[in-house]
Amino acid sequence: MPYKLSIEENGHGIVITLSGLVKGEEIFRLNEQFMSDESYPQWRYQIWDFSNIADIDVTFDQLRSYAIQDSIASRINPNQRIAIIPRKKSQGGLDSIFHVYEEVWGGYESKSFRDVDAARQWAQSGQKKHSQET
């Protein structure tokens, strides 16, 4: 799973742009890597851009494990938001399921967007909603 990590200009957020075949265990390991970053406590948002991936292999159990992982991470940094840009080709609703798991088991607000700019605007705002943009 190739990815590009961009640290936002203000240092308070990151954008993860994924490509190729995305596998559930790779997302889990990548999230663990982020949680161990020394600047993690200062982050206020993560934008996960799946818009141009080739395919995704993630189970519902793995989505739930990400939310639980976020619950643990919220002890280190309780002030983050997670924005997701779903895959453009075939939306299977995995982002919506993740949002439900995040609300029940996770520690962060999460929402889906069509593009990084919209995600960034929400992530940097004080708005507190768990719904998916239509």
Image (cartoon, rainbow, N blue to C red):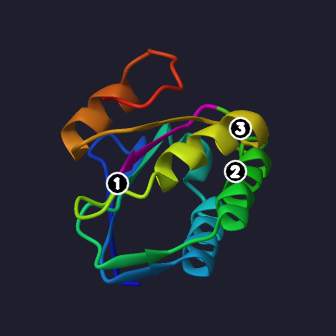
Residue 77 visible in the snapshot: no
Mark 1 residue element: loop
Give the quarter of the image for residue 48: bottom left
Whichever of callouts 1 and 3 sits on the residue coming sooner in the sequence is 1
In the rendered image, residue 80 lying in the magenta stretch gets the answer yes
- What is the magenta segment's predominant secondary structure? strand
Q: CA distance from mark 1 to mark 3?
A: 21 Å
- Please give the name of the residue rendered at 46% of the width and 51% of the height, measured from the top-left corner: 93
> Which residue corresponds to mark 3?
107
At 35% from the left edge and 27% from the top edge, which residue is drawn? 122
> Pointer 2: what residue?
67
Lateral position of residue 82 relative to residue 69, left or right: left
Q: Are marks 2 and 3 in contact (CB under 8 Å)?
A: no
**In this rendering, is residue 9 above or below 65?**
above
Mark 1 = which residue? 86
Image: magenta residue range: 79-85
Q: Is residue 90 left or right of residue 45?
A: left
97 on left or right of 122? right
**Is 19 located above or below residue 80 in the figure?**
below
Tell me the quarter of the picture where residue 66 sits: bottom right
| Viewer-side label of 2, 3 | 2
**Horizontal and vertical percent position of residue 112:** 39, 40
- What separation in Å lies between label 2 and label 3 (alpha carbons)? 7 Å
Q: Quadrant of the N terminus?
A: bottom left
Image quarter of residue 115: top left
Q: Nearer the viewer, residue 16 or 100?
A: 100
Q: Earlier in the sequence, mark 2 or mark 3?
A: 2
Label 1: how many residues lie within 10 Å, few (<14), some (14-19) or many (20+)?
A: many
**Looking at the figure, which quarter contains the C terminus?**
top left
Name the secondary structure under disc 3. Answer: loop
Closer-to-camera residue (134/83): 134
Residue 71 at x, y = what percent? 76, 45
